[in-house]
Amino acid sequence: MMKLLKYFKIYDNELCPCDSGKPYINCCKNRKDKTIKASKKPLEIQVMEQFRKSQFKCCLYPDKSNCVKHIKEAHALQNNKIISQLAEEGHVYILNTKKSPIVIPIENEEPEIIIPMDRVGIKHATTATCFCDIHDDEAFALIEKGAPDFDPNNKGHKFIYAYKSFIFEYYKKLVEQKVFIDNVKQYPSLLKIKEFVRYYRAISMTLQEMDNIKDFFDKRILNKDYTGLETCILEIPESINFANYACLALDFDINGNKIKYTHKGFISRLFVTVFPEKTKSYVIMSCLKEDYSVYKKLFYQLQNINLNKIKYYLDLVLPLYSENIVISPRLWEKWDDEQQMIYTFLANRQRSQFLTYKTMFALGMRNLKKQESNFEDGNRGRIDLFQKV
Ligand SMILES: [Zn+2]
Ligand SMILES: [Zn+2]
């Protein structure tokens, strides 16, 4: 009972969520809101807007003794190798969280909030201010410009891709936490709202989990020790027209079976990168060695099920689970309005709707369990990221 209650209220004696270091009762519990909220925009939109403004500069490299002052816009997906390969006239399409979302009012319901797909210059695609000039070069040198193409047998390559997908998602969580704290400082009364407490618990838990993973990576990055991960690589024999990075937990595998990724309340995550090279493409999925039992089956399927069916599966899960997909104008502009709309809609599903769709997709994959053929080009559904252009 007490355990459950924790999701709805902040206790007097726990550390105040505003990060003051004081107990809640001596801090925000009795503090008044700075101003009365004047904005009529839904809270969700306000948070999204603050998210844009709250991007702060830092260097997440584990050893900060050599940091230089200048923090660059570091690319989660390498500009020279991946983004520029996707670009046409220096532009690609991404879900642009740095722009104001579109709000569509719906009668008697919560408004629909849509982050639109946006044509952006390659200098701004998948960037974040989370490494200083020196350490962006140092941490990712193995897979950066001068480096050879991805080598599936190179432990260092696989490790750095996993690290990169993790650390950029980690930075986003830090920004989210900052937005939360800034809000609490302004409006301590938010801590008396159930929904808000729940959000606080969720983000604290996620960051605690991710901090553990960060420790794992930090030690190894410093020592250039590329052990401790299990990696599954899928090679696609053509150059695809999108790329993606993500740190996520998938709920179902290619046969629609549930993946039990929660262990003692902690979530086992996958580090995923998908990208094209000149004549082929790769899907790299890694997890911590200790989580291998969770994803073993999925990894097996990725190596053994026919490629067209795997593509069908990725077409369903990637837009739904990840907000970091970069699409080449060659592909995006080939899609008609309806396809572009379906994609944008799926990529924007949150909370209960996200749940509905993933349950539906899992069921779909389960129904196709025995079907091995008929997943070729043109049969893969309305949204096909692997479509040839
Ligand atoms: Zn406080
Ligand atoms: Zn640095």
Image: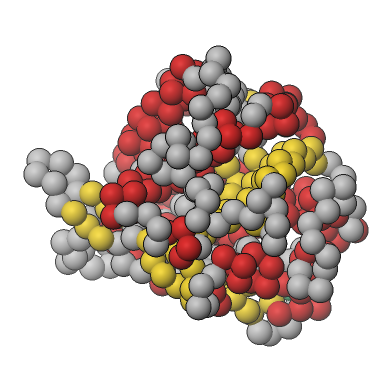
The answer to whether residue 237 is visible is yes
Q: Nearer the viewer, residue 203 or 94?
A: 94
x, y (%) of residue 171?
Answer: 58, 60
**What quarter of the picture does the N terminus occupy?**
top left
x, y (%) of residue 124?
Answer: 52, 74
Q: Residue at x 86, y 61 (%)?
A: 222
Is residue 286 positioned above or below 362 on the image?
below
Quarter of the image for residue 139 reads bottom right
Q: Quadrant of ligand 2?
A: bottom right
Q: Nearer the viewer, residue 335 or 196?
A: 335
Judged from this view, the residue extending furthest toward the left is 107
Instruction: Judge left or right: residue 20 versus residue 199.
Output: right
Q: Residue at x 62, y 67 (%)?
A: 85
Q: Nearer the viewer, residue 114 or 79?
A: 79
x, y (%) of residue 317?
Answer: 50, 38
The answer to whether residue 75 is visible is no
Q: Residue at x 69, y 68 (%)?
A: 81
Q: Residue at x 46, y 58 (%)?
A: 331
Instruction: Judge left or right: residue 354 versus residue 70.
Output: left
Is residue 376 positioned above or below 136 on the image?
above
Is residue 339 positioned above or below 287 on the image?
below
